Image (cartoon, helix red, strand yellow):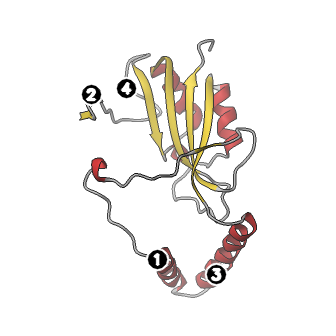
Amino acid sequence: KEIYGSTINFKYGDAHNINSQDHSFDLVVALAMIYYLEIDKFLVEVNRILSEDGTLFLCMSNKDVPGFVPGPHTTQYLSIPQIYDILKNAGFECTILGGFPRKGAMWYIRLQALMKGILKSFFLSFKRGKFWWSMVRSKSRGQLKPLPKSFLHMEATTEKPIALSPSKANHRYRVIYVIATKKNDH
């Protein structure tokens, strides 16, 4: 497929057993998926198919943001230090970035998360509580926008990702981006 004048080939398959030749990709993109995988198996395959100086780009939810709710069928969510250590041990040099920050003072963000948890527990204690909780959640989100028909019609965000420390959890940024480049000595 041609995108912005460049040819990009997409392949679909099993992330634990990638049907591609060794060193055949310069870039592997894993968007919001690593928490559904056995990370060690996935990284063995990524290391195998990436070129010598290839890059793995990850985008993942930040489990350390107050009020985080895990999705169904996930195997595990990793903190920034956990994913950094896993990738470092797998032979990658990493840059960690944060996007989509929670607005407001941290005490207020934590208070909101606490109140949300209490309110959710209250609703779920009733027979039709799940229904009413989903109604409250949908109303609190405001008007949703429909997805565009094409990536070319998406609204760009003006907020740039912020560099984060790989050695500590972050409680403000909802999305974590990881740019992991293979080390030549591994």
Give whichever of 168, 122 is nearer the camera. 168
Residue assigned mark 2: 7
Find residue 138 and name its label. Answer: 1
Q: Which mark is residue 108?
A: none
Across and down, in percent, residue 13 comes to 36, 35
Q: Tell me the CA gap for discs 3 and 4.
A: 47 Å
Quarter residue 63 falls in: bottom right
Residue at the spot of label 4: 19
Disc number lying in front (3 or 4)? 3
Residue 99: image location, x then y, percent? 56, 50
Between the residue at mark 1 and the residue at mark 4, the CA separation in whole angstroms equals: 41 Å
Q: Quadrant of the N terminus?
A: top left
Vertical placement of residue 147 versus 7, above or below: below
Residue lying farthest front? Answer: 158
Is label 1 in a helix, a strand or a loop? helix
The location of residue 130, given as percent across then percent down, is: 52, 80
Residue identified by numbered label 3: 119
Q: 10 Å neighbourhood of mark 1: few (<14), some, or many (≥20)?
A: few
